[in-house]
Amino acid sequence: MSSSLSKVDNGAAFLSLFSISISLSSCGNSSEEIETTQENIETTIIFGEKDFVFPNLSENAKNYGMQWGAFEDFEIEAKSLNGSTIDGLRTKTTRLINSLDSIAKKVPDTLNTKPITSRVTVAKTRAMLLNEEVQKTNIDTTRLQLQIKEMNNAARNLIIQINEKFLKDAIDFQRIDNEKKEIESQKRLMDSIFKQEIKDNKSN
């Protein structure tokens, strides 16, 4: 009888150890699967808005943009975010922040207006939030996509604001030029009338 009980106990112990072994093996496989899935997300999934269109700088704005330190780098990096993997975004957001740091420190006098500097600040904030997102261990892909969308909008709004500045300057210049021409025209008319009066007086 005791021999039978001993055999039963040994069998139960073996089954228990076998179950634990399977359980541990299963946990190990599950952990490996999670790591593999995360790695696939970071290296294969493409993020951003591939159809997003950034406005072009006007000719006048482009001339100043070329003189504005890292502004061209900012444009390149902002556009390149769309269609990138997480690995690519980590590198690009770092470069984007660096370019925004540079242009924020040295704004040309012509562009140093409240609306433009405010848009630069917003763009830099969005770039930093995006960078925080891509540096996380477990990334929420939906949230990441939203952060890229917000960065796109911030970059677009900055470019639009720069264009509007030069458009307003052009309108103001045209208005001033028109006023100047009108004054000159009136002056010529008055001179002509005055000369005619002198001529008439001499004739009389």
Image (cartoon, helix red, strand yellow):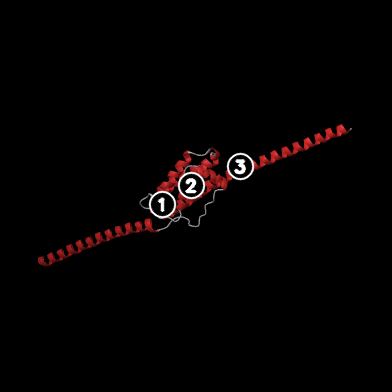
Q: Distance from label 1 to label 3 (Cα)?
A: 37 Å
- Residue 193, horizontal then vertical, whole percent: 81, 36
Quadrant where the N terminus is found in the figure: bottom left
Instruction: Check the image and name the residue furthest to the right.
Output: 204
Question: Along the line of sight, which residue is nearer the eye, 53 or 175?
Answer: 175
Residue wearing tag 1:
89
Residue wearing tag 2:
72
Identify residue type, mark 2: Glu
Question: Along the line of sight, which residue is nearer the eye, 118 or 111?
Answer: 111
Identify residue type, mark 3: Asp
Can residue 161 be seen from the camera position used here? no
Instruction: Check the image and name the residue furthest to the front.
Output: 203
Question: Along the line of sight, which residue is nearer the eye, 49 or 175?
Answer: 175
Give the crowd class for mark 1: few <14, some 14-19, many >=20 residues within 10 Å.
Answer: many
- Helix, strand or loop at label 2? It is helix
Q: Please tell me which residue is depicted at 76% across the width and 37% down the height of the picture.
A: 188
Residue wearing tag 3:
169
N-term mark: 3 or 2: 2
Identify residue type, mark 1: Leu
